[in-house]
Amino acid sequence: FFCHSLAAMRGLLGVALVAAALAPAVGFYLPGVAPTDYTKGTVLNAKVEALTSVRTQLPYEYYILPFCNKGVNMESQEALNLGEVLRGSRIYDTPYTFKLGYDETCKVLCRRSYDKADVQAFVLMIEEEYRSHFLLDNLPTAMSVFHETDDGETTKAYETGYPLGFVNIPVDEEGEEVAKEKLTDTPKIFLFNHLRFTILYHEDPNRHGIRIVGFEVEPFSVKHKYMNQVDWKQCLNKMAGQGGNCNLLTCSKDKEVNLSAEPMLLNPDKKDPTEVIWTYDVHYKPSPIRWSTRWDAYLQSADDAQVHWFSILNSFMIVLFLSGLVAMIMVRTLRRDFQRYEQQDFLEEGQEETGWKLVHGDVFRPPVMAGWLSVLTGTGVQLAVSSFILMVFACFGFLSPANRGALMQAALFLFVFMGMFGGYTSARLFRMFKGNRWKSNGLWTAMLYPGTVFCIFFVLNLLIWGQKSSGAVPFGTLFALLCMWLGISTPLVLAGAYFGFRKQPIEHPVRTNQIPRQVPQTPWFVDAPLNIIVGGVLPFGAVFVEVFYVLSSIWLHQFYYLFGFLFLVLLILLLTCAEITIVMVYFQLCCEDYHWWWRSYVSSGCCSVYLFLYSLYYAQAKLQMARGVAVALYVGYMLIISYSMFLITGSVGFLACYWFVRKIYAAVKID
């Protein structure tokens, strides 16, 4: 079974490398939605997603703050897929309207009077660096950021969303912000109440239609002033000064807001109501960007392809080193071993055999807790197969960022429907270990990993729910996840276990002795703790650069779409795990220690421990958690990710070692 499986995996590896090579770094994707052609004068309505912050990792509905909502149906939400719900995304309409092709300046959205509690809510969100995310034609709004390259050229990139406001912290003589402990006065907090939208459009003369290819925003803080009494109900979505109404001193239909205007200060200790006038501008700009490549600016802003190529090169060098080491063992050491064992006059009187051949009668002896080893390996195979298919789909562009939540939704469904692979592998191993309770084995395979993840997720969800965040998954969705687990995944795992247990047990190339052999004292470099520590260092060292970008995309809310790079790095990771574990097991068998089953699994899976430790360092260096719940969420989700990686890498290392051990013992004659 495993020989055929490894042959099939080699074939799939070739296909994967071709797919990864064909997948460009950016730009190639299937958008997931059909383009919409507009005509000049079409009225467009902006939508809004949840408020997000990298300091709390807790999304909130946009209207949890008292923004303008005149004419918005607060009960109506856009239909969301499962991935969006799990991300905490909530999409609402907004009163922001744009007339395509017509610039509009200083449009009055509304006037609001906020009491002390409202102002304090805004202040808290601004201090925690929350950002708002508008949507237009399925494009997220973004702020333009300009970077200067080493060649002196200026490149434009995007930061999605815009901050709700800013905290004015003084700077010292060196230009660095003064620490809060050294501040004598409370920092002033300002609200962004004026937005300047720039809509980029591409007009194809052959189609007679206008397509939106960019949605930029520039926020301003302005304390609007007016002289006479204003009927604000009549000013909704009208330009200031239009028809002699809604006259503002700070801006008008002919005068834009400038940076010298007095900013909108929020005082959380002020008892009197605070008046805020919300306004916005709309400008249209023709662009040569085509609709099919409009996401490139968002994707390029998150990643540097040169760094990813360095990561690939670094990983490839490690794999070359390990491959050379394995080849040396295979070609030189093993060949010498075979020649020595095949010599008829090798053993002199009173001399005993040494090396890995000496433990041929015990090397396939079932390990302690063999049932648990089969369960973990089956789950790891299920995760590995679903991850492989997910990466293939992502490389070919089926999981476009235009289709929000598609990646998470696809990962869930693939894991559920790949349960048969996990059940089949677990049952085959369980029967090889002379187990007979295949139903119990299948149930543990179906329940252990999903049950552990669901319990952690449920506890974290309670914490999120206690913070009244939109990231809390509704109980209806939790029930749907339970139905997917118990109603689809579990029966598929049991079906795979049934077919796997019905097949003939795997035949070992040598017989196992009835009495186990005593293991002699092994040298220090073969001790289990050292093997496990070293077994995880090299695989993690091959991928740690890419891990940084993946963590940034998750916790800094950046787009990650270099799946071609990621696919190559993951394949290198699995290849490194297999090679380093084979080397460790060979040294172990040469020292006449035949307890290799669990050690091969744990030493290969140990790279997940380094992943978790690196994630703690990343959180300390890059993230400034503002709440204890954010720390709990980070640790909980990284535990789930590390646990999943442990199962995948451990299973790959174990199966590679089993293939290696079968090969070497099948190649020698045993008396």
Image (tube, helix red, strand yellow):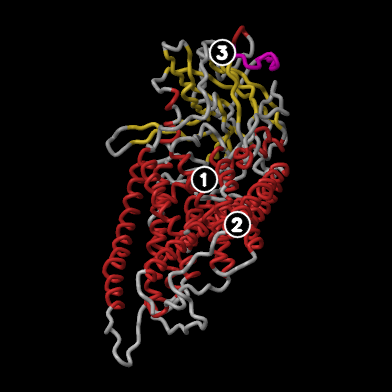
* Kind of residue at badge 3: Thr
Q: Secondary structure at mark 1?
A: helix
Q: CA distance from mark 3 to mark 2?
A: 58 Å
Where is residue 104? Give x, y as percent.
54, 15
Compare residues 339 and 161 and report the one nearer the observer. 339
Where is residue 461? Give x, y as percent.
67, 49
Where is residue 368? Give x, y as percent.
56, 74
Query: Which quarter of the rendered picture does the C terminus lie within?
Result: bottom left
Residue, x 42% and y 17% (percent of image)? 286
Sort mark 2 into few (<14), some (14-19) or many (20+) by Cα contacts within 10 Å.
Answer: many
Q: Earlier in the sequence, mark 3 or mark 1?
A: 3
Circle 2 residue: 497
* Kind of residue at badge 2: Ala
Q: Secondary structure at mark 2?
A: helix
Above or below residue 392? Residue 40 is: above
**Is 280 situated left or right of 291 in this image?**
right
Q: CA distance from mark 1 to mark 2?
A: 35 Å
Q: What number of labels is visible?
A: 3
Q: CA distance from mark 3 to mark 1?
A: 36 Å
* Kind of residue at badge 1: Ile
**Is 128 situated left or right of 115 in this image?**
left
Nearest-to-viewer mark from 3 and 2: 2
Sort mark 3 into few (<14), some (14-19) or many (20+) by Cα contacts within 10 Å.
Answer: few
Q: Earlier in the sequence, mark 1 or mark 2?
A: 2
Circle 1 residue: 554
Q: Decide: marks 1, 2 in contact (CB < 8 A)?
A: no
What's the mark number on residue 325?
none
What stretch of residues is rendered in magenta?
A: 228-241
Look at the image and say whether residue 231 sits in the magenta stretch. Answer: yes
Q: Residue furthest bottom?
A: 350
What's the mark number on residue 42?
3
Q: Residue furthest top?
A: 243
